Image (cartoon, rainbow, N blue to C red):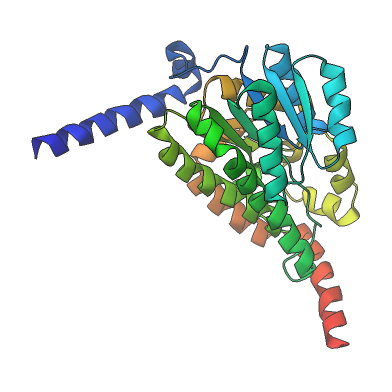
Amino acid sequence: MMELVGESLRALTAMTVGATRQLPVVGAVLGPSDALSLPGKTVLITGAARGLGAEIARQVHARGANVVLVGRRLDGVQAVADELGQRALAAEADVSDFAALQRAAAAALEHFGGIDVVVANAGIAPPSDSVLSIDPDAFEHTVDIDLLGQWRTVRATLPTIVRRSGHIVVISSIYAFFNGALNASYAASKAGIEQLVRALRVELAHHGATAGVAYLGFIDTDLAADVFAREHVDEARRAIPGFLTKPMSTEAAAAAVVRGIEQRAGKIGAPGWVLPMLRARGFVTTLMDEALIRNARLTRVIRDLDAETLLQDDGR
């Protein structure tokens, strides 16, 4: 009985300290619980040919890390590797192909001797449709890349992470807890990532390895610009407060991820409002759902998308 009480107290103490470290001011004073020094470490990043993945590669490389850049086409990641110079290796792998990811991990082991950090970043933006109007193949393709592609990346690199007591960051989104109207396949994938990493953190603890989720808002990339340029997306975007969809710079998003890596953070959030909103998610998400249900602008967009699909269905 006393042993059980002792274990419970130790668990409660660890939980309290861990939660306290997440507070901005107190966490800065206490410092990270198990800091990860990047010089000499090897960081593997998927989706590294451009955008966030390439910028994370630049920032960790500047801190002295070896970098393995993984992308669907070798020429794209090779260009970034050439830009970085020494301590950079390019590898071709599509995250839909588990064997290709295993080969990329093997190349990293052969070239650098191991992998200390994995950033599972590769992903796609779905068509901005309702659940009724989206093509089923498009929905499933998004889940295959944005959720199962992350799982494949984690699984392919996990043995070396375990052996080296490393750290994994899986790039998620505010859509892990935001309402996914017109983005259900993407939101479902990002929420799934959150649960994957929660389980992974527990399973890795006894190995001395760690994992974290990066909850990122909209980032100023060509991909985001293309999505926002769609008329019905722009219309729906106006249905929610502007600060929620204002894009942050790629540099700022990457810097948040890199800080999280160095701190072995379980949760990374950017911009600054994301983590406070995540902590209040029970209230915020309920309020958001009810507000969107009653939003005339969004209702009009969804109604128009669904009407076309129903018309096509009636014509069959």
Give how far across and how far down residue 136 sits, in percent: 76, 69
Give how far across and how far down residue 47 sits, in percent: 76, 37
At horizontal 73% and vertical 56% (from top left) the residue drawn is 142
Furthest residue in direction front, as rendered? 110
At horizontal 65% and vertical 61% (from top left) the residue drawn is 293
Drawn side of residue 64 relative to residue 129, left or right: left
- Whether residue 59 is visible here, answered yes or no, is yes
- The answer to which of 227 and 160 lies nearer the viewer is 160
Q: Relative to 170, is 287 above or below?
A: below
Write down the quadrant of residue 84 in the picture. top right
Drawn side of residue 275 relative to residue 220, left or right: left
Give how far across and how far down residue 257 sits, in percent: 64, 27
Drawn side of residue 201 relative to residue 88, left or right: left
At horizontal 68% and vertical 29% (from top left) the residue drawn is 108
Q: Relative to 262, is 240 above or below?
A: below
- Whether residue 249 is visible here, answered yes or no, is no
- The answer to which of 184 and 148 lies nearer the viewer is 148
Give how far across and how far down residue 68 sits, in percent: 72, 27
Q: Relative to 208, is 196 above or below?
A: below
